[in-house]
Amino acid sequence: MPSSLIPAVLTKLGPLGPDDVTDLRPFLEAVPDPRSRRGRWYSLASILLICAAAAVSGARSIDELAEWGARADIGVLQQLGVRRHLMRWRHAPSRSAIGRALERLDGDALDASVGAWLAQRHRETDPVNGKEPGRTKRRAIAVDGKALRGSARLEQPHRHLLSAVTHERPLTLAQAEIGRKTNETTHFKPLLAPLDLQGNVITFDALHSVKANVTWLVETKQAHYIAVIKTNQPTVWAQLDGLRWTAVPIQHTASNTGHGRRESRSVKTVGINENLGGIAFPHAKLALRVHRRRRESGERETRETVYAVTSLDTHQATPAELATYLRGHWAVENSSHHIRDVTFREDASTVHAGTAPRAMAVFRNLAIGTLKAAKASNLAKTTRAIRDNPERALPLLGITNNATIPGT
């Protein structure tokens, strides 16, 4: 196809050659099929692949998943593993077939499979490690929760998900449905247990600043943490607030302007000497004080002071890097949750039966992680360009023309 016919937003993606992207198919084939074998025409993997390709194309509901399949030609359906009828035609699964499959899925297995594939994509697209000679660039992972507000019904509350998302490009490595926000703390360890976290930096808000969890992170998973401390940890907060911060010089400053506001941040750090009593928080090596000033357009300036502790020592991270980790955690709200709500209309989705709400969230995570790994700068424009030609979604998922696919 002449390059002039390819939208400019897609020419920036890549590399997307057959050897550049791991095939998603074997990962989805590991998801157990909950359906009865009798009367089963479409394989579960083919249904999930259609959902994945449709999500990358911007599909926001089960109806749009089915509509994407209906637009796909025979060649695309063949590559996705849709069986050929004896009369030699191929049809995409209907809306009801897709809906029934998603409602009965094993949500944990689907999350694990997609998370494993996204982790592989992270390794494939990870930039060269190290900013300075002798200094390794650490992967940062944010643990944060999100509500699926549209999934609520009179007889049931909305679903709540807890996710582990990389900072640099929002790839959701793990996700779990936890019932409600108050359950986030108890699901912290089960969420991160399957991941290889050695040497990584885990960031989380004050809700997860629990001593048992951070002890497990450092001693069992060999990871580092940056924990925000608020008044829900009164002893630690009082110790941090009582330090002589006025005698400590500002070690890093940063400012940015956008979305009708101007924000500036200053960072101070203090080493914690365990021989002198330390801080009542396990494995804490540095105390951080972040002072933020924000001025909304036409409003008065607001100021906020945030305290945090970290297991990283002064030789392991500079104040600028610590500020980047904290900023990266707060930015996950915009780089992942905001995209799910605005581009994919997650909060407006009324899917509520069975595991379908969680499955749809998994495919949104897959789409965001896939497009970010391919260096898409504007996801809304990119998904629209892919939607117009369904075959454009396949290289992003590592799917190539394979005549040996069972059932084709």
Image (cartoon, rainbow, N blue to C red):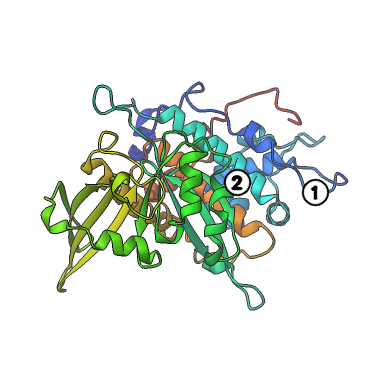
Q: Quadrant of residue 99?
A: bottom right
Badge 2 crowding class, 10 Å Cα cut-off, few under 14, some 14 to 19, many 20 or more, is: many
- Looking at the image, residue 21 lies above or below residue 28: above
| Lateral position of residue 371 relative to residue 269, left or right | right
Please name the residue shown 52% across and 65% down the image: 181
In the rendered view, tell whether residue 334 sits above or below residue 129. Answer: below
**What's the residue at 67%, 77% (across, down)?**
155
Is 376 left, or right, of 92 in this rendering?
left
Q: Position of residue 98 (x, y in %)?
A: 69, 52
Q: Is residue 241 left or right of residue 195?
A: left
Farthest residue to the right: give it: 38
Residue 71 visible (yes or no): no
The residue depicted at 72 percent of the width and 57 percent of the height is 96
- In the image: residue 108, left or right of residue 260: right
Quadrant containing the C terminus in the rendered view: top right
Q: Which residue is mark 1?
A: 35
Cα–Cα gap, marks 1 and 2: 19 Å
Secondary structure beneath label 2:
helix
Residue 214: in sight, yes or no? yes
Q: Amino acid at mark 1?
A: Arg
Between 76 and 306, which is closer to the camera in this rendering?
A: 306
Q: Estimate the x, y position of residue 313 in percent, counting from the top left.
A: 30, 39
- Which of pointers 1 and 2 lies earlier in the amino acid sequence? 1
> Residue under circle 2?
111
- Residue 263 coordinates in the image, percent (x, y): 18, 59
Q: In the depicted view, which residue is nearer to us: 195 or 99?
A: 195
Residue depth check, mark 1 versus mark 2: number of the one nearer the observer: 2
